[in-house]
């Protein structure tokens, strides 16, 4: 098997990188073990929520305060802007318009009634300006087990928001006894179902200025089901971020996948990359587990988007050392495994910030700062010196590094 | 060591009076825990016969201490699910804890996730409460609301102005209880985590801290304390 560029990993970084490389004229093969964080996250674009533990108002400006070696410093603010702007255009063209900009962070409502910090929000999650200052109805769909309006409303009220829990009955529909958010979202894709659902939802809202519902308003029709239901109900509907699987994430994944297919990007799902072949300082092939044997795919360029420890791109060994799984890239380990994790679960964990150190061209480097290979690039959570969860930067780092690699590799004519 | 499933379940009562001329001794050999009550019955039947005890045998119907659900019949779990579908729905896929079990535990008066953990084993499995904890927290919140008498239907209750800081029914904050639960789980497992468990821990962190923005009890985050290297791990 031959490819021009192999991208390993199909999370936020791998998908954006693969699309942008294909848009820049490269022929791309995506190898992925499974789904990435797109399926898990809140369905929004986090750029920078906290620096040094303190909340940030202006995500782009605050990148100045990040420590040296942070991916945002490696690629520069221009790449951050390029990455986020590209995403906003891509998503809008795919029927998933987002609100927000790099000058100001925004609050996103969650199913727990908490507010998380993010930069770009899909429109169904945004809500009208200032809606939390008015009366809010928190409404579940009767029988949907993964959202508790009581839990959500209680927390909102604790934080001074006038929130009232309620339930809206679902019209009769064909479903398994225990239906998931995915099945409900698919049902809501149907216009007739929405027409039958809307009156009960409107009654449950009972004149509230905004209605918070779990993020299940459609799966395969972009934001159209949300927009339609909102107009039928006659009040703003706000999707609260739920636990995985992320329906908004699945909408985005479907859009990414459709774009990749239209660009002719080949895709091998369920085929983990397990090694590389080298000739001197170049990778000549990527080895991946096929159905019955290990396959070697020859390639000009290799982009690793495998995530850090959380993404399964790096293994945390018992003795405190870390191993990068595909190419054996150098990764700084720890004194021992007790240093991996902090004392509080909800605090910070050093292991989450561990990764591969890279240069300004996102090539992995050794301890002296020299690139370990000429044609490997690293994007996303695999990179060192940032904790995407603690600092709220996962999608921003993915998009900024994808932008950088696409620019770098587009400049090189395909051989 | 190794897989014990292949060990035979058959057992034998060795009749020493008949075989060895030892008049007052029996041995029982073989068997597995699954057959222990049958083995006990077989031995005691021999003894009863020898000793002229004619009491009817109650082994098949006697409920052992701690077996709250009474004698177990093979088809009973299925029958129970058919009667009440909550027993067929998993809240905790790792430990196979059903909605019915959690609901019963909550109805019996348990109000904290820590109590649910002890009663039904919530959060003990490989995912370390990634999914069951927030589902159970939702069930606790719903139970509190139902207990407070608020209507469950679409009509909202008329609440005065802004929230007072207490919950709608005056009870403790379920989300705060969830944070405490997660921290309590963490204390027990933190020092044993590497490999796949490290991955799971960071994914759980990405859910509760990253998606749900839970921070726990304020205060500065403790950095992981570097430890002296123990002699050989």
Image (cartoon, rainbow, N blue to C red):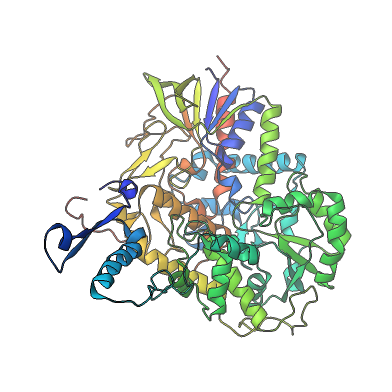
Measuring from the top left, give residue B66's x and y in whole percent: 40, 75
Q: Residue furthest top?
A: A415
Q: Is residue A201 left or right of residue B205?
A: right
Quick check: A282 above or below B145?
above
Which residue is at the front of the view, A1 or A26?
A1
At x 75%, y 69%, the residue is A167
Residue that protrudes farthest toward the left in the picture: B21
Q: Which quadrant of the structure image shows residue A341?
A: bottom left
Numbered-mark total: 0
Task: Please name the residue shown 49% across and 53% down the image.
Answer: B203
Asked if residue A156 shows in the view, the reply is: yes
Q: Is residue B213 left or right of residue A336?
A: right
Does residue B223 appear in this view? no
Residue A298 higher or lower than A16, as above or below = above
Which residue does the image show at 78% across and 82% down from the upper left?
Answer: B158
Determine whether B225 is above or below A21 in the image: below
Pick the residue in front: B50 or A21: B50
Q: Residue A291 placed where, x, y %?
A: 50, 27
Q: Is residue A13 above or below residue A202?
A: above
Residue B102 in the image, given as x and y percentages of width and height: 55, 70
- Residue B191 percent across, percent down from the top left: 32, 59
């Amino acid at each position: 098997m031959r490819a021009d560029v192999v991208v390993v990993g199909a999370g936020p970084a791998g998908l954006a990188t693969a699309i942008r490389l294909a848009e820049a004229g490269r022929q791309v093969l995506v190898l992925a073990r499974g789904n990435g964080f797109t399926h898990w996250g809140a369905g929004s674009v986090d750029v920078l929520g906290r620096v040094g533990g303190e909340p940030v108002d202006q995500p782009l400006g605050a990148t100045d305060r990040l420590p040296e070696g942070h991916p945002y410093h490696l690629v520069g603010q221009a790449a951050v802007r390029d990455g986020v702007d590209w995403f906003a255009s891509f998503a809008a063209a795919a029927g998933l318009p987002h609100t927000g900009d790099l000058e100001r962070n925004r609050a996103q409502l969650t199913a727990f009634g908490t507010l998380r910090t993010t930069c770009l929000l899909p429109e169904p999650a945004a809500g009208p300006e200032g809606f939390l200052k008015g009366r809010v109805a928190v409404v579940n769909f009767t029988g949907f087990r993964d959202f508790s309006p009581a839990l959500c409303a209680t927390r909102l009220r604790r934080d001074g928001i006038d929130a009232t829990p309620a339930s809206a009955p679902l019209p009769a529909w064909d479903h398994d006894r225990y239906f998931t958010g995915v099945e409900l979202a698919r049902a809501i894709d149907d216009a007739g179902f929405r027409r039958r659902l809307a009156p009960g939802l409107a009654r449950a809202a009972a004149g509230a200025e905004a209605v918070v519902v779990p993020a299940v308003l459609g799966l395969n029709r972009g934001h159209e089901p949300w927009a339609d239901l909102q107009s039928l109900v006659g009040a703003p509907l706000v999707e609260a971020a739920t636990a995985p699987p992320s329906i908004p994430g699945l909408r985005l994944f479907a859009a990414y996948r459709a774009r990749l297919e239209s660009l002719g990007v080949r895709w091998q799902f369920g085929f983990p990359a397990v090694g590389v072949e080298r000739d001197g300082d170049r990778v000549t092939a990527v080895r991946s587990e096929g159905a019955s044997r290990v396959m070697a795919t020859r390639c000009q360029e290799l982009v690793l988007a495998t995530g850090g420890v959380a993404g399964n791109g790096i293994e945390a060994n018992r003795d405190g050392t870390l191993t990068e799984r595909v190419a054996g890239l150098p990764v700084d380990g720890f004194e021992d495994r007790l240093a991996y994790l902090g004392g509080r679960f909800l605090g910070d964990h050093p292991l989450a910030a561990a990764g591969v150190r890279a240069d300004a061209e996102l090539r992995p480097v050794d301890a002296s700062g020299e690139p370990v290979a000429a044609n490997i690039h690293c994007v996303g959570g695999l990179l060192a010196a940032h904790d995407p969860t603690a600092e709220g930067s996962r999608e921003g780092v993915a998009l900024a590094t994808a932008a950088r690699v696409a620019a770098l590799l587009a400049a090189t004519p395909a051989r | 060591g190794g897989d014990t499933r292949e060990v035979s379940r058959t057992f034998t009562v060795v009749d020493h009076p008949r075989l060895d001329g030892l008049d007052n001794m029996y041995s029982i050999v073989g068997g597995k825990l699954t057959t222990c009550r049958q083995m006990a019955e077989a031995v005691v039947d021999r003894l009863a016969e020898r000793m002229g005890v004619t009491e009817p045998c109650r082994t098949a119907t006697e409920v052992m201490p701690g077996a709250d659900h009474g004698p177990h019949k093979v088809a009973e779990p299925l029958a129970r699910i058919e009667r009440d579908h909550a027993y067929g729905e998993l809240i905790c896929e790792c430990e196979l804890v059903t909605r019915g079990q959690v609901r019963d535990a909550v109805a019996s008066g348990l109000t904290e996730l820590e109590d649910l953990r002890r009663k039904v084993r919530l959060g003990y499995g490989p995912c370390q409460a990634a999914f069951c904890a927030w589902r159970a927290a939702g069930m606790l919140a719903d139970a509190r609301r139902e207990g407070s008498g608020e209507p469950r239907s679409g009509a909202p209750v008329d609440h005065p102005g802004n929230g007072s800081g207490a919950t709608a029914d005056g009870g403790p904050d379920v989300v705060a209880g969830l944070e405490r639960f997660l921290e309590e789980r963490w204390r027990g497992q933190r020092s044993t985590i590497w490999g796949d468990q490290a991955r799971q821990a960071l994914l759980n962190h990405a859910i509760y801290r990253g998606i749900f923005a839970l921070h726990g009890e304020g205060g500065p985050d403790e950095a992981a304390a570097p430890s002296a290297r123990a002699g050989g791990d």
